[in-house]
């Protein structure tokens, strides 16, 4: 087997593992696979018509993110979201949002800043509608992450997405903090438009109370 053929096989296996990872992750987010649900790798392998190797790789990635617990030679179980997990995820999200802002804001163009400002407006709308904050904030910070110029950070955020959405799915800004959060959003929007990365980083963290 040539080096090229070996590389292609490796990339194919990775793509399969990615597909399984995102599929199971989305099912956990959507509640199709609820807490304490048992996942058998052989069943997943049959569903995707693949070997058990990419399934195990996907489950290992989900375990590192805390979405499942693997019991070797037995089964894999979906974990339960506790108040402690929500709090830890909120802090993690805050620091990663700050990093995304710090790296992304200086790199985006004027047109992209205008687009980002509109995404911040969507965060305001989500607050007014008393919606969970994760989706509107993810649109902002994944955009900044994608324009960070740092492949490692992008890869980390892509994997972390499933944990953020699952663990913070129902998290909302406390009602008594709504006015202050609107002010934080407005200041963040202004920092983005003037290209102030330091201030954007500080405000991104403040959105998550870190």
Image (cartoon, rainbow, N blue to C red):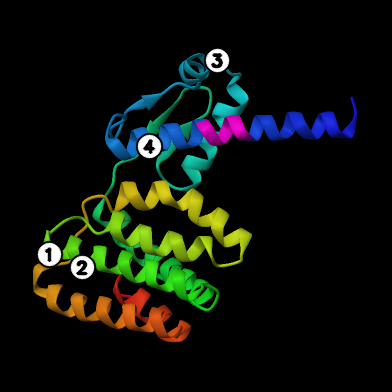
Part of the protein shown in magenta: 15-19
Is 84 situated left or right of 41 in this image? left
Q: Which mark is residue 49?
A: 3
Position of the N terminus, as image quadrant, is: top right
Label 1 neighbourhood size at 10 Å, few (<14), some (14-19), many (20+)?
Answer: few
Apparent side of residue 192 relative to residue 125 in the rendered image (left or right) = right
**Residue 23 drawn at (x, y percent):** 44, 32
Residue ID at (25%, 65%): 123
Which comes before the other along the chain, label 2 or label 4? 4
Please tell me the numbered disc located at residue 195.
none
Q: In percent of the image, x 50 and y 14: which residue is there?
A: 46
Q: Residue at x 29, y 83 (%)?
A: 187
Q: Real-space Cα distance between discs 3 and 1?
A: 45 Å
Where 29 falls versus 76 (above or below)? Answer: below
Quarter of the picture containing the C terminus is bottom left
Among numbered discs 2 and 3, the one appearing first in the sequence: 3
- How far is disc 3 from disc 4 in space, using C-alphas? 19 Å
Nearer to us in this view, 38 or 154? 154
Residue 144 in the image: state x and y as whole percent. 47, 66
- What kind of element bears circle 3? loop
Q: CA distance from mark 2 to mark 4?
A: 26 Å
Q: CA distance from mark 1 to mark 2?
A: 6 Å
Residue 143 image point, x, y percent: 45, 61
Please give the label number shown on residue 124.
2
First in residue order: circle 4 vs circle 1: 4
Residue identifier under label 1: 128
Q: Position of residue 45 (x, y in %)?
A: 52, 18
Above or below, 194 relative to 130: below
Mark 2 neighbour density, 10 Å: few (under 14) some (14–19) many (20 or more):
many
Q: Tell me the number on the disc at residue 26.
A: 4
């Amino acid at each position: 087997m040539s080096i090229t053929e070996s590389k292609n096989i490796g990339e194919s296996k990775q793509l399969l593992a990615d597909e399984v990872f995102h599929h199971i992750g989305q099912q956990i987010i959507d509640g199709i696979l609820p807490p304490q649900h048992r996942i058998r790798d052989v069943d997943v392998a049959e569903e995707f018509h693949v070997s058990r190797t990419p399934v195990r790789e996907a489950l290992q990635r989900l375990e590192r993110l805390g979405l499942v617990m693997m019991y070797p030679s037995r089964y894999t179980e979906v974990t339960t979201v506790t108040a402690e997990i929500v709090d830890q995820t909120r802090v993690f999200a805050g620091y990663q949002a700050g990093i995304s802002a710090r790296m992304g804001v200086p790199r985006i163009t004027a047109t992209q800043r205008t687009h980002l400002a509109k995404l911040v407006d969507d965060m305001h709308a989500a607050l007014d509608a008393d919606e969970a904050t994760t989706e509107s904030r993810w649109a902002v910070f994944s955009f900044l992450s994608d324009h960070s110029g740092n492949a490692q950070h992008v890869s980390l955020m892509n994997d972390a997405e499933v944990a953020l959405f699952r663990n913070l799915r129902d998290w909302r800004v406390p009602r008594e903090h709504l006015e202050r959060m609107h002010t934080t959003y407005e200041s963040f929007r202004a920092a983005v438009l003037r290209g102030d990365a330091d201030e954007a980083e500080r405000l991104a963290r403040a959105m998550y109370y870190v």
